[in-house]
Image (tube, rainbow, N blue to C red):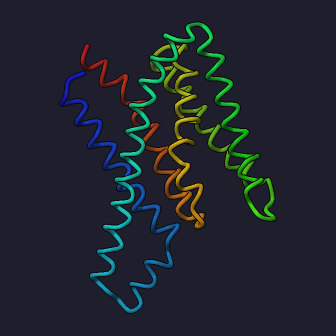
Amino acid sequence: MNSRKWVRLFLSTLLIGGGLTLVLSFVFKQQSYADVLQPFQFVELIGLILFFSGMGFIFSVISQMGFFAYLTVNQFGKGMFRSLWTPVQWFLIAFTIFDLIYFRYQAADDASIWPFILTALVLLGLSLIVAYVKAKETKPQAFVPALFFMVVVTTVEWVPALRADSSDYVWLMVISLFACNAYQLLLLHRLNKQEA
């Protein structure tokens, strides 16, 4: 893949991260916008828009670093574990889902376990859809690595927001990360196909 296509991937992912986070901020941070609209404060509104766009750009860059790290780890895993690499990935996927439910529930004070189960199942369900599309568009062997990337790498990238006190930022980050990760995963083989 040439540098022009890498730049295209970088910039388009950056725009998705920034734009999606900005749109989501209108849903998850409504009060912040209400505070600057009544009374109307133009400079503060622009600052808020720049803040959430910038946050989305940061989420996008985190997603892209995770994607390139995943490409390296996947090649390293294939070389080191050989035929065991697929079972290792399945184990890491299962452990990550368990971690998203059990350890987060243990860290929460007097919370119900159901939101943690629902969050993990939604992440797994959406990841299965992305992995299925990737495998259908490329080859069946791409399913497990794609699922591994969407579940494990997205969760690792999501850790800073999981430690935050505000659930708004947790959702802002994971939705943007998931969208950027899915976009990169599904665009990569198309860019490689154009190259061939």
User: Could you tell me residue 125's position as x and y percent?
Assistant: 64, 38
**Which residue appears at 33% of the width and 60% of the height?**
54
The picture quadrant where one finds residue 156 is: top right
Residue found 24% across the figure and 18% down from its top: 195
Quadrant of the rendering where the N terminus is positioned: top left
Question: Residue lying furthest bottom in this view?
Answer: 39
Question: As drawn, which residue projects farthest toward the left?
Answer: 4
Location of residue 22 with respect to 143 vertically, above or below = below
Picture layout, residue 23 above or below residue 60 = below
User: Eyeballing the image, is 92 above or below 161?
Assistant: above
In this rendering, is residue 193 above or below 173? above
Between residue 59 and residue 104, name the one nearer to us.
104
Quadrant containing the C terminus is top left
> Residue 47's spot in the image, x, y percent?
31, 74
Give the residue displayed 69% in from the left and 38% down from the top. 97
How many numbered circles are shown?
0
User: 132 and 143: which one is in front?
Assistant: 143
- 57 sits left or right of 80 in the view: left
Q: Could you say where residue 149 lies in the image, as x and y percent from the top left?
A: 52, 31
Q: Position of residue 128 (x, y in %)?
A: 61, 31
